Image (spheres, rainbow, N blue to C red):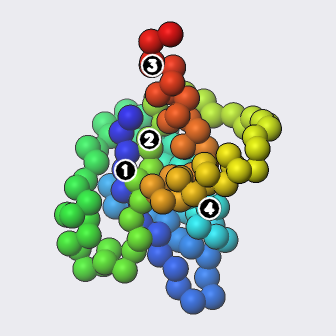
């Protein structure tokens, strides 16, 4: 799956802002880091959907080092956001997990710049590719 670099910025007294160097104008924000990550996935998916509907070709993801070499980006925190496959839809699901499992999932996701949802989706895709 293709992933794009998102930059999170936080000014005093503001929400966590998120921007995508590869997609000028694709911005969002969240009250906390978890919300900002989730909003970043949604914003990127909607932005990509609009570009594809308008017949644009998606850019290749830029190299993190190149992005961080830009002085305007140096105060941002970088995270990778997966690009939704064209035509795929997202939905909300309710599930039951042990609190220990949920904490482990959240810790892993946080440490790897992911949201809970993106981690679970990646885990499912990996498991589905394994031979039965």
Crowdedness of circle 4 by 10 Å Cα count: few (<14), some, many (20+)? some
Alpha-carbon span between mark 4 and mark 1: 17 Å
User: How far, Cα to Cα, is label 1 from label 2?
Assistant: 7 Å
The secondary element bearing badge 2 is classed as loop
Q: Is mark 4 on a helix, strand or loop?
A: helix
- Label 1 crowd bin: few (<14), some (14–19), many (20+), radius 10 Å: many
Judged from the image, the secondary structure of the residue bearing numbered disc 1 is strand
Q: Where is residue 10 in the image (x, y as percent from the top left)?
A: 52, 80
Left/right placement of residue 132 relative to residue 71 reads right
Kindly identify the residue that appears in the image at 47 percent across and 75 percent down.
Answer: 9
Q: Which residue lies furthest to the front in this view?
A: 100
Residue indicated by mark 2: 83
Which numbered disc flags the more N-terminal residue, 3 or 2? 2
Residue 107, percent from left and from top = 57, 57
Location of mark 4 (residue): 34
| Residue beneath disc 1 | 4
Q: Do the residues labelled 3 and 1 touch (CB within 8 Å)?
A: no
Is there any visible trace of residue 88 in the rendered image? yes
User: Are the residues tagged 3 and 4 within 8 Å (C-beta)?
Assistant: no
Residues tagged 1 and 2 counted as in contact (Cβ below 8 A): yes
Above/below status of 62 relative to 124: below
Q: Earlier in the sequence, mark 3 or mark 1?
A: 1
């Amino acid at each position: 799956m293709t992933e794009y670099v998102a930059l999170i910025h936080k000014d005093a007294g503001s929400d966590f802002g998120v921007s995508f160097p590869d997609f000028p104008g694709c911005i969002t924000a969240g009250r906390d880091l978890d919300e900002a990550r989730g909003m970043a996935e949604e914003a990127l998916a909607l932005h990509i959907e609009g570009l594809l509907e308008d017949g644009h070709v998606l850019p290749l993801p830029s190299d993190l080092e190149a992005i961080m070499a830009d002085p305007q980006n140096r105060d941002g925190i970088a995270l990778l956001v997966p690009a939704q496959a064209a035509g795929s839809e997202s939905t909300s699901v309710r599930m039951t997990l042990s609190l220990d499992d949920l904490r482990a999932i959240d810790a892993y996701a946080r440490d790897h710049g992911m949201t809970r949802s993106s981690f679970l989706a990646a885990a499912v895709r990996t498991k589905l590719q394994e031979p039965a």
